[in-house]
Image (cartoon, rainbow, N blue to C red):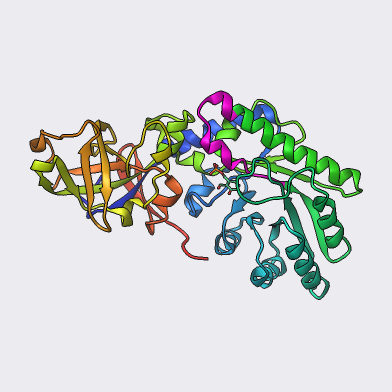
Amino acid sequence: MAELPETPLLLLDRERLDANILRMRSALAPHNVTLRPHVKTNKCLEVTQRFFADGKGPITVSTLREADVFFAAGFTDILYGVSIAPNKFEHAARLLAQGADLKLVLDNLETARLLADYARSSVQRFNVLLEIDCDGHRSGIPPDSPVLVEIARVLEGSGVTVGGVMTHAGNSYDSRSIAEIEAFARQERDAVVEAAQRLRDAGFELSVVSVGSTPTALFTQGLSGVTEVRAGVFAFFDLVMAGLGVCRVQDIAVSVLATVIGHQPEKGWVLIDAGWMALSRDRGTAKQPVDQGYGVVCDVSGQPLGDLIVTAANQEHGIISSRSGHLDNFTALPVGTQLRILPNHACATAAQHAGYHVLTEGRCLGYWPRIAGW
Ligand SMILES: Cc1ncc(COP(=O)(O)O)c(C=O)c1O
């Protein structure tokens, strides 16, 4: 790394990134499925290109802004993974008109009727995946609901193809053991495969059966009937994933470089110039057995420093203390010391930054910008 760069900044360890991608590809290799990585974690062309030895995509995006930027860079097969809002129909139609193979998601009759009406007066043909609720986590249609076929019938003949079904096992993040993650993976697969079967029985031809969360993707024991896996955070990993036992702390590829700006010895605090603006307010480990505060403190080379964590975060101040209560050895961390903070949630921490300072063999050899906004 350059001599004492100005902080805070976001570091990305390229070797760890590549190893994490390889691990996911190896985990999925026996299952004969396509990896459609979710780029919401990285929001970066250079990172996403590393998923694909040849070709560009397929990918999942979390915003149509990501779709615009990735499409302009040559990624054509794009799944927008959030239920489409009516005020985005035009944006989606624009991407289709430009030649994108864009797939949309929806999970309710209201949106289906609005999209069907829009499609009837559009020259574009829309391709939709119906979202299935596999675990009560958030959105989606229960796989056994009659609404599933009703939605497909509303779309039929309107200029909207029902191309498949998709689900996301978000509740796998609450697992307390690998066995529980494996059970969530089974539940995720079973739900979309059941939904696909019901639609096929009703006469719909589906080509896509899509699942995806990092824990379930890495610990699935069978994906028969599934065609693709969307996972995202695995490329970076984070303390939430380490807390689940999905990765090791030393696999985490992103960290925030920060600098010691002061001490409060009577309180056992070290102050750094990275507060929640640099680290995010995400406290995803708070509900795990080991609460990591706002992040684990490492030395500048990335080695965790004993039991130090960021225990509090103001906008531009982070407060470091030791998990056991008191930090006595302040001389080891004088003002100006640079430290790395590992994030609770890589997507949230990375989103606080405009781009990645990329480390290769410990040296910062590049800057990769991120896509911001919607
Ligand atoms: C719809 C959808 N698919 C896939 C993913 C990827 O999950 P993960 O970040 O656990 O890999 C997410 C993450 O939130 C998601 O919302």
Give the residue drawn at x 50%, y 28%: 176
Instruction: Name the residue nearer the viewer: 251 or 156.
Output: 156
Q: At x 64% / y 44%, what residue is drawn? A: 136
Q: Quadrant of the N terminus?
A: top left
Q: In the rendered view, does 66 fall on the left or right side of 111?
A: left
- Vertical relation: 353 (above or below) 307: below
Residue 364 is left or right of residue 268, and the answer is: right
The image quarter in which residue 309 lies: top left
Magenta residues, as a range? 166-181
Query: What is the quadrant of residue 195 in the picture?
Result: top right
The picture places residue 370, in percent across and down from the top left corner, at 44, 57
> In this rendering, is residue 328 above or below 335?
above
307 magenta-colored: no
Residue 245's spot in the image, x, y percent? 47, 28
Front residue of 191/358: it is 191
| Residue 3 visible somewhere in the drawing | no
Task: Answer yes or no: is residue 133 visible.
Answer: yes
Q: Nearer the viewer, residue 115 or 46?
A: 115
249 vs 104, left or right, is: left
